Amino acid sequence: MADNALTLRLKALIFFRAVFITLLLGSAYLFRIEYFYAHPNAISYLIIVLYVLTIIYSLLIHRIRNLFLFTYVQLIIDVFAEITLIYITGGIESWFSFTLILTVLSSSIILNKKAGYVIASLSSILYGGLLDLQFYRVLPIEYADIMQEKQFLYNIFIHTISLYITSYLAGYLSSRLEKTVEKLEEKDTHLKDLELFNMKVIESLPSGLFTTDVNGDVLIFNRAAEKISGTPGDTLIGSKIDRALPFLSFPLKEGRHEATLKAGKDDQKIIGINISVLRDINGKETGFIGVFQDLTQLKKLEAAIKQKEQMAAIGELSANIAHEIRNPIASMRGSIEMLRDDRIPARHREKLMDIALKEMERLNNIVTDFLTYSKPRSPEKKIIDLHLLLEETLSLLNNIEQNKGNITIRRDFSGPLYVNADAQNMRQVFWNLGLNAIESMENGGELIVSTRQDHDSVRIKFSDTGAGISPENREKIFFPFFTTKDRGTGLGLAIAYRIIEEHNGRLSVQSIPGIKTEFEIILENQNGN
């Protein structure tokens, strides 16, 4: 890698040297240098020699193994050529002393900072020696008699300082540039590795994934997407996404969607897709990303599981109904058989008739509750005052048989609270929750009914200080016919749960056994205000 970079820089040096020599030769003949210099032919010979050397350098550049040394040799020859040019063109009076600065600059850029100092030192020594020999007239280079020794020394000093300053600045900038290039190359390598890793991850995803630009043209379409949609990704890139997924329309809508996709003449796939907006670091929308799966088999499995659950629920429900109905029927049968014998005293007959009537009433309640649960009446929603319904219900709960007078009912609400709901259904929910709370406080306690209105919901809480619900029963209390009491059908909470579901609400429970139980109803705030 380093040799390739040095080769490129060396080629650039050879090219610029050839350009400089050409300009020097062209200007020599253009401006007829014989009027300015005493040895015009020597300049021509020097240019020819440099041309020949440039050709030799070009031929050897791919054959020399030690390019570093080869570059050093070229730069040193350049220095000697420049000193020769300065000698031919008048020494201290030559216009070409600047070429030494160009060579020092080249050495720092092409090789390194150290090479720049070496070439600067060589140039300073040769240039200073040339001017010394000229001053003492050792070399046959004429100069004006008015020039004194201090002018020669000053010229040497200025050139030496200039060469070293050039070497330092060029070396500093070159090293910084080299470090910057290395960091950029390193980051480029990391980016390529990251891009490759991301593509591997994308292609390995079991879910279909695509990205589009803001116009809906596909940018990425992974293997799983090809398999699910049946469309090759290489033919889709740059096309609209609805070519592979016809159920999508542009602009794409964010969120989770389900749709069907034709998989053949008669087959269809159920596709679940999640679409999000792609944004850059400034938050500007740059496109869309979609992740989708083939839900066909999952939907079939869900349907099969639901069917099995329904069959199991029907079986369990049937067993519970049979159990609940069998008890009152058995009591009624026993009472009727004893009455039929007509051998019991009159005072016992009345008691047996009361038992039979109570069991009939119990049987009727079971059937009524079951019909309410199994065939719920469609809610007739209208704007109602929940606080008014709660007040009516709590007044009735104060006077029921289960309330022995040792239970305090506290209201934590005031004023009207309007919601869009079915009054009869909500009255039954409040009755069932209140009755359940009172029956849990056999030894007395307190029932607190509170309400709270939020921006988007209404919350009603029934909190009691009764026996509480054990953790193992907490998940079963909304199941039909589940009860821990001697009396009751076990349908009250199940009916309340279903009614709240029909109102698109939620019914939840929290309980600390032996301390308290809290049922919370959450309804959407649709009061029409």
Image: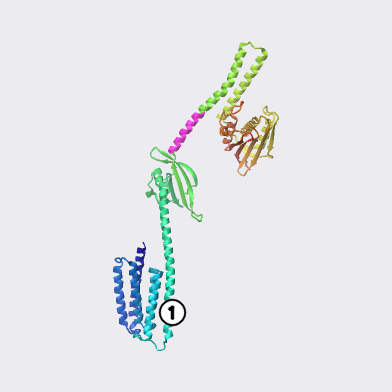
Q: Is residue 80 visible?
A: yes
- Mark 1 element type: helix
Q: Which residues are magenta?
A: 296-313
Q: Which residue is mark 1?
A: 158
Question: For residue 306: magenta?
Answer: yes
Q: Position of residue 287 (x, y in %)?
A: 46, 52
Q: Position of residue 33 (x, y in %)?
A: 34, 82
Q: Quadrant of the C terminus?
A: top right
The quarter of the displayed image where residue 359 is located: top right
Q: Residue at the top extreme?
A: 343
Q: Nearer the viewer, residue 19 or 163?
A: 163
Q: Nearer the viewer, residue 294 or 345?
A: 345
Q: Position of residue 319 (x, y in %)?
A: 53, 25
Q: Quadrant of the N terminus?
A: bottom left
Secondary structure mostly seen in magenta is helix
The quarter of the displayed image where residue 468 is located: top right
